[in-house]
Amino acid sequence: MRLAALPSLPANLVSSLESCGIITEIDLLFSASTLEILRRLTPGNTSLQELERFKALVANSVSAPGHSAAELSKETEEEEEDALLSGIPQLDEILSGLTLPGRLIEVSGDKKSGKSSLLLHLVLRHLVHCPGSNVLWVDTTGDFSAVRAADILASSYDSDASLTLDRLEVSAAFDVDALHEILEELRSSLCSGIAPPPRTRALVVDTITPLLGPFLSPVSSQGHAIMTSTMQRLRGFAQAFSMTVFVVNDSVAFSPYIPGSASNTPHIRKPALGPSFTFLADATLWLVNCEGGATNKRNENASNCTKHIAQVYRSKVTTSQIWRSFEMRQGIISP
């Protein structure tokens, strides 16, 4: 940075320094000692004490602020409180490090692995506990069910379902252009400064596969460019507006199986849209449905209970290849 751009230095001193070849803050702080610089200046322009003071002001204005360990610890605790959690302790052990504001998370798995159910549970629980928050759910398949959301609220929380669902906005997007239109409307609303609370805390795209998949081709790079720009835009939303963005991705056949699998049988599936897509997200959460996982025969609803595994398949922000199990009863997460 040029010294002339710093408001803390007198104009006449800056002019004298520039005439001696000292133009930037680096020149002033590191090119020579204070005494040597003073000798190069016009006599009577400033004193040694004044020049030392000016150097200290410049160093303070261009240096990064310091933080104590106590401050960093407090910030970490506040971030953990902002994570979208399930309320299931063993599952939240991995979710607490993933679902923070500013993150773009891919959620993938085979059919009936619980992708949409888990995300619906997370956002509904957040809306119940945070009345000042809002969630945007982009439905790309027409499968979103308000009745199902109301059932989750009725079975899991003692709250007014209608008031909670008022803050869950659902938009339909059946092609990538429609998704970009929704994002542009959201950006305009968030940047206008006139939109009253609640603020949008999370964005879910369920699923992104049918929007991007048709463009991908082994003989053309256009589809890859569309996929990259879409994911970069979603990441920009997460970071610029401090929200958590989830993209649900289907799975495709894969051989050999994923190493380090958490399930008892080898994976024969992997996230769709190719390996590049996974690296465009901050982390990939892989879900597995373990058929017949419920073993509590005393429960008359045991036949409707399925065991699932959530595994951090790949992550830039937490430890990868860790997993936790959870159960769903009739499509609703059970403690």
Image: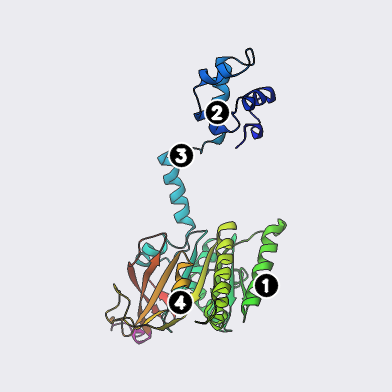
Q: Separation of disc 3 and disc 2 at Cα?
A: 26 Å
Residue 302 included in the magenta stretch of the image:
yes
Looking at the image, which residue is at 47% across and 80% down?
250
Q: Mark 1 vs mark 4: which is more N-terminal? A: 1
As drawn, the label of residue 181 is 1
On screen, residue 17 above or below 220: above
3 vs 2, front mark: 2
Would you name the residue on which mark 2 appears?
28
Specify the quadrant that holds the C terminus: bottom left
Q: Residues within 10 Å of mark 4 (few under 14, many from 20)?
A: some
Amino acid type of the residue that numbered disc 3 sits on in the rendered structure: His
Q: Is mark 3 on a helix, strand or loop?
A: loop
- Badge 4 amino acid: Gly
Choose mark 2 or mark 4, whichever is in front. 2
Q: Please tell me which of labels 4 and 3 falls first in the chain.
A: 3
Quote the CA–CA distance across marks 2 and 1.
Answer: 50 Å
Closer to the camera: disc 1 or disc 3? 1
Q: What label does residue 67 carry, if any?
A: 3
* Numbered range of the magenta stretch: 297-304
CB under 8 Å between discs 3 and 2: no
